[in-house]
């Protein structure tokens, strides 16, 4: 609601207009076509653990299934070459910025419909929590802090998850997200639940205190 670095501000009660403006700006920045497709955003800090290895084998299938992809990653030469060539071949469907840019990262959060984190490992992670706040529904692998913060879509869920470090499992989770995306009311409810998530230290500290009280009571 107050971020001065995104094209339009929005909150839980007025998501649609502001997020649509951010999505339009994201598409313009990454050369993506105006389309009914959900935009999948990725910010890969460490190429080795970021899960790009399981995205690459199925990225063609993702595009064929009706996704657009926007990637920010200062990865190593292998990933840079792959995504640069992909963006060139699949203009309008894929865009890549192979730089470390806070401005582009914020645009990914604000403009993406889906935020993909298929990490091999992630002891804690913060990007999934930021994505939740910005209403970019996370699709994450169930590892470390990703598993702690993101729960499979349900009445209480806030995203989509998969367990195996596997391209097929990741693609299945993305397809579940895509199917709900095309159910307008269901998707809007999920986005609002995601944005309501409280991952601040006040809530975390209360959980720690409850745990300590239970331990003391058992001793």
Image (spheres, rainbow, N blue to C red):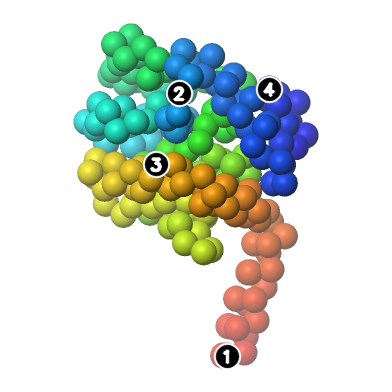
Q: Given this view, does label 3 or label 4 mark the residue nearer the observer? A: 3
Q: Which residue is mark 1?
A: 219
Relative height, residue 166 to residue 101 (above, below): below
Q: Residues within 10 Å of mark 2 (few under 14, many from 20)?
A: few
Mark toward the start of the polypeptide (3 vs 4): 4
**The quarter of the displayed image where residue 211 is located:** bottom right
Q: Residue 86, how many percent across, how many down?
A: 30, 16
Q: Which residue is mark 2?
A: 35
Q: Position of 196 compared to 144: left or right?
A: right
Q: Which residue is mark 3?
A: 178
- The residue lying toward the viewer, choosing from 140 and 205, is 140
- Residue at image position (42%, 30%) is 37
Mark toward the start of the polypeptide (4 vs 2): 4
Q: Given this view, does label 3 or label 2 mark the residue nearer the observer? A: 2
* Alpha carbon separation for disc pair 1 and 4: 54 Å
* Alpha carbon separation for disc pair 3 and 4: 25 Å
Q: Residues within 10 Å of mark 1 (few under 14, many from 20)?
A: few
Label of residue 7 in the image: 4
Q: Given this view, does label 2 or label 1 mark the residue nearer the observer? A: 2
* Alpha carbon separation for disc pair 3 and 2: 14 Å
Q: Position of 146 compared to 83: left or right?
A: right
Q: Given this view, does label 3 or label 1 mark the residue nearer the observer? A: 3
Q: Secondary structure at mark 3?
A: helix
Q: Secondary structure at mark 1?
A: loop
- The residue lying toward the viewer, choosing from 137 and 209, is 137
Q: Residue 94, how many percent across, how many down?
A: 38, 19
Mark toward the start of the polypeptide (3 vs 1): 3
* Alpha carbon separation for disc pair 4 and 2: 19 Å
* Alpha carbon separation for disc pair 3 and 1: 49 Å
């Amino acid at each position: 609601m107050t971020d001065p670095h995104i094209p339009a501000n929005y909150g839980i009660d007025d998501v649609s207009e502001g997020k649509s403006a951010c999505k339009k700006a994201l598409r313009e920045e990454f050369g993506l076509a105006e389309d009914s497709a959900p935009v999948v955003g990725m910010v890969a800090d460490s190429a080795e653990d970021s899960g790009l290895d399981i995205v690459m084998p199925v990225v063609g299938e993702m595009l064929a299934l009706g996704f657009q992809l926007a990637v920010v990653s200062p990865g190593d030469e292998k990933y840079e070459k792959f995504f640069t060539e992909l963006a060139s071949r699949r203009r309008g469907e894929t865009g890549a910025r192979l730089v470390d840019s806070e401005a582009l990262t914020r645009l990914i959060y604000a403009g993406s419909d889906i935020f993909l984190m298929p990490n091999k490992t992630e002891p804690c992670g913060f990007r999934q929590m930021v994505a939740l706040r910005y209403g970019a529904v996370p699709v994450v692998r169930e590892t470390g802090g990703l598993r702690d913060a993101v729960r499979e879509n349900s009445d209480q869920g806030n995203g989509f998850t998969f367990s195996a470090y596997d391209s097929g499992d990741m693609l299945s989770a993305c397809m579940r997200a895509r199917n709900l995306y095309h159910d307008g009311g269901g998707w809007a409810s999920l986005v609002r639940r995601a944005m309501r998530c409280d991952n601040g230290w006040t809530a975390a500290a209360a959980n720690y205190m409850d745990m300590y009280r239970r331990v003391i009571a058992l001793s």
